[in-house]
Image (cartoon, coloured by chain):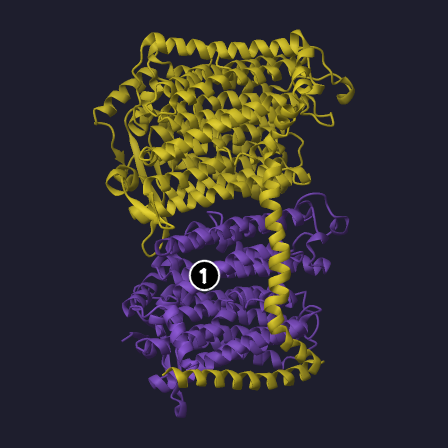
Amino acid sequence: MIELKIAEFPWLSLIIWLPVAGALLLGLIPRRAEGLIKGLALVVALGDLAVSLPLWFNFDRHFVGFQFVEKHSWIKALHAQYFLGVDGISVLFILLSALITVLCILISWESITKKVKEFYISLLLTSAAMIGVFCALDLFLFYVFWEAMLIPMYLIIGIWGGPRRLYATIKFFLYTLLGSVLMLVGIIVIYFKAGSLEIPTLMQMGLPYKLQILLFLAFFAAFAVKVPMWPVHTWLPDAHTEAPTAGSVILAGILIKMGAYGFLRFSLSFFPKATLGLAVPMLVLSIIAIIYGALACLAQSDLKRLIAYSSVSHMGFVTLGIFSLTGNGVEGAILQMINHGVVTGALFMCVGIVYDRTHSREISYYGGLASVMPIYAAFFMVFTMASIGLPGTNGFVGEFLILLGTFQAKKWATAFAATGVILGACYMLWLYQRVFCQKINPQIARLPEMNLRETVALLPMLLLVLWIGIYPKPFLSFMHVSVGHLLQHVHAAGSGPGLTQLIKEGLHAVFPA
Amino acid sequence: MHGEMLHQMAHLVQSGEAVRYSAQALHYTVWIPGLPLLAAVITLIFGRWYIRDRAHWIPCLAVFGSFLLSLKALWDVIHGVWANFDLFSWVVASTVKVSVGFQIDPLSVMMLAMVSCLSFLIHVYSIGYMADDPGYYRFFSYISLFTFSMFMLVSANNFLQLYFGWEAVGLCSYLLIGFWYEKKSAADAAKKAFIVNRFGDFGFALGVFLVFVYFGSLYYQEVFPRVHEVIAGKSLYLLGHPVAVPSLIALLLFCGALGKSAQFPLHVWLPDAMEGPTPVSALIHAATMVTAGVFMVSRCHAIFELSEVAMLAVAAAGTITCFMAATIAPTQFDIKRVIAYSTLSQLGYMFMACGVGAFAAGMFHLFTHAYFKALLFLGAGSVIHAMHHAPDPNDMRNMGGLKKYMPATYWTFLIASLSISGIPGFAGFFSKDEILASAFFSEYPWGKFVWFVGTLVAAITAFYSFRVVFMAFHGEFRGREVIHGEPHESPKVMTIPLMLLALGAIVSGWIGIPEVLGGGSHFAHFMAPVLGHHAFHAAKSLELGLMAISVAAGLLGIFAAWLAYVKRPSLQYLFPRRLPVVYRYLYRKWYWDEIYLYLLVKPTLWVADTVVALIVDTFAIEGTVNGLPQTVRFVGGGLRRFQSGVVQHYALIMALGAFALMILLHYYF
């Protein structure tokens, strides 16, 4: 039985519902009072960040199980409950979500000029739903948050996005939908098999091996699209590219982490036997994503698209770490999820900063920017190095642990995956050279340096890059107990027959002849 | 240095009394990297607005502080106080626990002292060389950051911090090669250096992982003393073939050394790195960073010695690079490139020493080389400073006769050239000879061959080194038209460091005078507790005979250079005319750049452009899914209709998905 520590004060509810309340309040403000709208949104987001801090300070890092738990009955007929709680796997994402919401508001301050009120309402609602996803301990509640998050998100892309936003939105919607539906079917099957929707209870259910495989695949559909894993990644470059800056930052920072979080929370703990059985195919898909994403970066001429493809590559490292099923690998993967949120989020913010000035995302539009905007160039350099995984930055700690963990499990996988580290240096440095070095392109010669607001928005990311890079212990210390427990659970399940055997049986079952 | 003291120390150590790493001692060494880091950060943040043209003060003082602390550490280590302590825990995950920690022993303290000394002199020199550069503060911030990183690299007590320093020096190298980033060639060279090094680091990282898998720790003290019990004789299966674990670890680690120390086949980045300012070439691309590979191999010698294959690989890479670079250097006209190729070649010597098991000899050459090579670069920098009005200030064809105009530069450059040519009495003679003798008397079968190539290259080295001396400093000045006037000597702030380095280029060798010449081989004895003692027992006459051969080779090279560039200048055109194909091959640097371009860079970009971006993304994956959005787009125009269109699809897909799953469930269970 997984232990629960009931919260004395409903912190999680407060974190989830404060932005919703803020959004409602924004709805009451007349749309002409733009300054008030933005100010209030910022205050709400800052307040949300403040009330999430108890999670950092009061979290018991030695407790196995869920903390800050709130449990109330909700829909009796479905046995669905309002059941919230966090453990070492989810807690950091709540903090990161709260932080990124603040930064998104700052970075959108001047770039969003139409339908300002609706924009900030959408942003706050997205934030609430995202945090809800990481808190939910009831499958039904989880699904509600999971889907609820999509609505404001595609409004953000669809209304405030770039010229091809409609196409991007539809694609984003269809991909995520396809996955979600299969997961919903999976949830229904689980409900009827196990008779419960409580995640802590379901973690203990031992389903038959073949059913585990099927359900794993159903959940996989939802998570793989979100991550996104190769080959269902193609919505991501379009969505990232067309989204407004804040949209890209949220997508990269939080939304795509939900897929990887889903693997950890559901796939590994609900279907441990299937996880063991399918680990190798997952590693292979991860490696393809790493190399393929990196190669695709080399072929891009659009700033945002390049960073979007780099997400594919970096998230490949995350899934690699998860399915290495070693302590180091999984802890590295969780840390790398945070890191990727910080670094890629920051890179998208950086792109947004120059996009606001030039309205161009073409790499060839720039050149010599380091002489024009030296402070900006310095920030960008730090994030570039973090993306490459230079020691001393956060990217290194994550990548190192992932590759080390994978090496302990499957040496060949590391050998392939590490080539992504070489390619990562190639595309990021090439990008940096084309944008910042060489002769100043005349059309950007008079761009103003970053202003105070923009610098303040990037500074927390810079500090996190260095903090996690130099002293990651506080971050990693959240994970040890939860990850250790999770992996013990997985490995205790023991693996079933191999994949080829299953496919044979499956084919035989469907086509008896 | 205190030769007697070193000797006593070695005795103490061999009797097993002093070899005790203390966790409490030498904590002040933290400030050796600490000071330059602070200086770098302060200069970077405040340099642009507040410090500007005074930016040299803080870094210079900080590095001088590091130098004094390093001397104190050297003193303490000589007196038998070694330290190994952790500062704070860095990466602590499930089974990994690594700290930022320091190991201060003869090997690291020697590097600390050498690096801090050179770094300080080069900081001072840069005050003159970089004056009036718009990026003045940036320059000082970067080289301070580099100095910090190099200190972290050499004083690490674990592989992860070594890797940190390894990559951090690479970053600084990248930033400084591309210091004049407006120039495309500089930006290209910087990127090339970083990426080529990444190839080496790829192997290095895998080697570190393998160490962790076998030893369960990344601390040196939990790895090196245990190599015999843990990995000796073990093998693992690679694609169905058994591979000896020590060989695999050593070879993977060596990949890193190939990149960082620019050895064949990863040597291509170093000549291009000359795009950076000359003090950078002296500090990073000659004296310190590029020798990190030799340092690392020596640090890990316990692993390398377990594997004959790895030792052969080290010797082979060193020998090939040593010879190849020496054949390219005489054909180049860019003064910095000639010296860059000589650096490659000399690094080759160091690896040759490692490859015959004479790690102390390799480290000795690393030590002396740092002084004379930094001096060569700074001297070249002084010349370039004088020529800086020329369209290409590095071109030796526009120089000549500079001896008259810049005597301080000339005499110091000459000392460095005599040192690298192995003329007795100068530092390079002792260290090169140590390597050649160790190779000749080595128990490894390739020792004699290494000796032969080493001696041959000694002659070529002397030739191309004096080619530079004669072309730049002797004869008549040929550059009046290009610089519109007379060249002038550099300011004192540049020439005084040159003189101090010239002193180093002579006396740094005296700490290792071999017994056969009446010395005490103090350097080797000092290193012995860390690197082991590889004494060879040879007849005195034979040893002296070998020495005579290498000196004769050096003199022959100098004579040939004098003949072709002073006495009968027509001789220098003989080779290009008689053997144009060979000349061209050497002039184009054995075509390695072209080989990599067509075998690696272009195919990768082609794959990226064609296969990935076009075929897979546009047709294969998109094609299957794109049908849907296109229908939807057809249905919906505005946002409202688009949503209603999607709802229909929601229902459709949901139904299809549920149907498919139910069929599966029905048949499967």
Name the residue carrying label 1.
A284
What kind of element bears circle 1?
Answer: helix
Q: From the viewer's perspective, tell me whether residue A109 is left or right of residue A198.
A: right
Q: Which quadrant of the figure has residue B382? A: top right
State which quadrant residue B510 falls in. Answer: top left
Query: Taking B174 as reference, is B355 above or below it?
Result: above
Compared across the picture, whether B370 is left or right of B382 comes to left
Q: Residues within 10 Å of mark 1 (few under 14, many from 20)?
A: some
Query: Relative to residue B349, is residue B627 depicted above or below?
Result: below
- The image shows residue A250 at horizontal and vertical percentages of 56, 67
Q: Residue B260, percent across and down?
A: 49, 36
Question: The C terminus of chain A lies in which quarter of the figure?
Answer: bottom left
Residue depicted at 54% across the width and 66% down the height = A231
Residue A91 locus on image (x, y percent):
41, 67
Which residue is nearer to you in this view: B323 or A177?
B323
Chain A colour in the picture = purple
In the picture provided, is B42 more to the left or to the right than B247? Answer: right
Chain of the residue under the numbered disc 1 shown in the image: A
Residue at the image position 52 percent from the left and 32 percent from the top: B284
Q: Colour of chain B?
A: yellow
- Residue type at numbered disc 1: Val
Q: Is residue A136 above or below residue A278?
A: below
Residue A240 visible in rendering: yes
